[in-house]
Every structure is written in C-alpha cells, then in structure tokens.
C-alpha cells in the first residue's frame, strides 16, 4: 500500500470517526452522519446496509419503493466493479417545525468503473428527506434532477 493511499485511508477513517462522535447527543450531527453512512454504504456496494437505512415507507420520486431501490442497487453493483459517490456542497438540516424530520441537499457525481478508470459518470441534484425512527435517521423520501 503506497504512503499516499495509506494517508488517504487514515484521513477518511478519522473524518468518519469525528463525524460519528457526539452523534447520539446532537441530532444534527446524527443526521449528517446518516447521510455520510449512506454514501459509504453505496460506495461499499452494501445493499443490505443501504436498505437498513431506508424507512419502511421509503419512496423515491413519489412512487418508487424499497423494492425498486433494491433492484436498482443490485443492477448497479453488478454492472460496476467500483462505485464512487462524490457529494459536493452537502447541506443537512433539521426541520425547525418538526424535529423528527431532516433534510439533505447536495450535488452528486456518481461514477462506475470496471477498473480504475470510470466508464460511466452522471451528475445529479439530490434531495433527501430523513425521518427520525427509533432514535435513528432513516431515509424516507428521495428526489433528484
């Protein structure tokens, strides 16, 4: 493992650790950690972990359910050996009127590759709505342009 790769891995691990610290006491930090965990689970091609983060009433684009999410991830993960999610300008906040709802808006670059060089890439404007469920933020609504 090269020194650059090792340093990058340590930086990412430290960032994730710091993002998780205090999340139990701070709903905002917990919301941000949930959004980061979703990104990590997608990049890790962990369908089960992503599904665990989806609320039971999950809907994408007001009509696509958890089964759609599972099929889509399965197809994406089979098609691409490597998946990279680049979230730019991620902004998360808790609804001031309903503290059990949170939101994340971000610009996302999504790329897939069979090797080191991406063979497909797309850009999306993504809006996520999170619901607090049993002390955990679960993704309930997803929309993108």
Image (cartoon, helix red, strand yellow):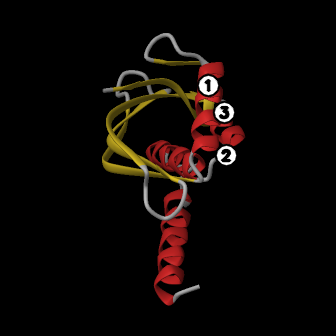
How busy is the neighbourhood of tag 3: few (under 14 within 10 Å), some, or many (20 plus)? many
The Cα–Cα distance between marks 1 and 3, rounded to whole angstroms, is 8 Å
Q: Residue furthest bottom?
A: 3
Q: Which numbered disc, 3 or 2, marks the residue that appears first in the sequence?
A: 2
Q: Are marks 2 and 1 in contact (CB under 8 Å)?
A: no
User: On the image, numbered disc 1 is attached to which residue?
Assistant: 55
Image coordinates of residue 42 in percent, x first then y, are: 56, 45
**Residue positioned 48% across, 42% down in the render:** 31
Q: Indicate which disc, 2 or 1, sits on the residue closer to the N terminus.
A: 2
Q: Mark 3 sits on what residue?
A: 51
Question: Looking at the picture, how far across and down is residue 14, in whole percent?
Answer: 52, 72
Q: Nearer the viewer, mark 3 or mark 2?
A: 2
**Which quadrant of the figure has residue 22?**
bottom right
Residue 33: x, y in percent? Answer: 51, 50
Q: Are marks 1 and 3 in contact (CB under 8 Å)?
A: no
- Residue shown at the point (64%, 42%) measured from the top left: 78
The quadrant of the rendering that contains the N terminus is bottom right
| Mark number, residue 46 | 2
Residue in front for this viewpoint, 118 or 33: 118
């Amino acid at each position: 493992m090269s020194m650059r790769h090792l340093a990058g891995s340590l930086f990412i691990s430290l960032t994730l650790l710091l993002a998780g610290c205090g999340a139990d006491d701070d709903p905002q930090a917990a919301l941000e950690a949930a959004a980061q965990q979703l990104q990590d689970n997608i990049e890790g091609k962990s369908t089960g972990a992503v599904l665990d983060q989806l609320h039971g009433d999950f809907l994408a684009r007001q009509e696509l359910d958890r089964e759609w999410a599972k099929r889509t991830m399965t197809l994406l993960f089979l098609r691409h050996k490597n998946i990279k999610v680049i979230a730019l300008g991620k902004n998360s906040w808790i609804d001031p009127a309903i503290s059990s709802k949170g939101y994340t808006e971000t610009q996302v670059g999504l790329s897939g590759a069979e090797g080191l060089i991406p063979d497909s890439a797309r850009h999306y404007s993504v809006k996520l709505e999170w619901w607090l469920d049993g002390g955990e933020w679960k993704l309930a609504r997803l929309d993108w342009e």
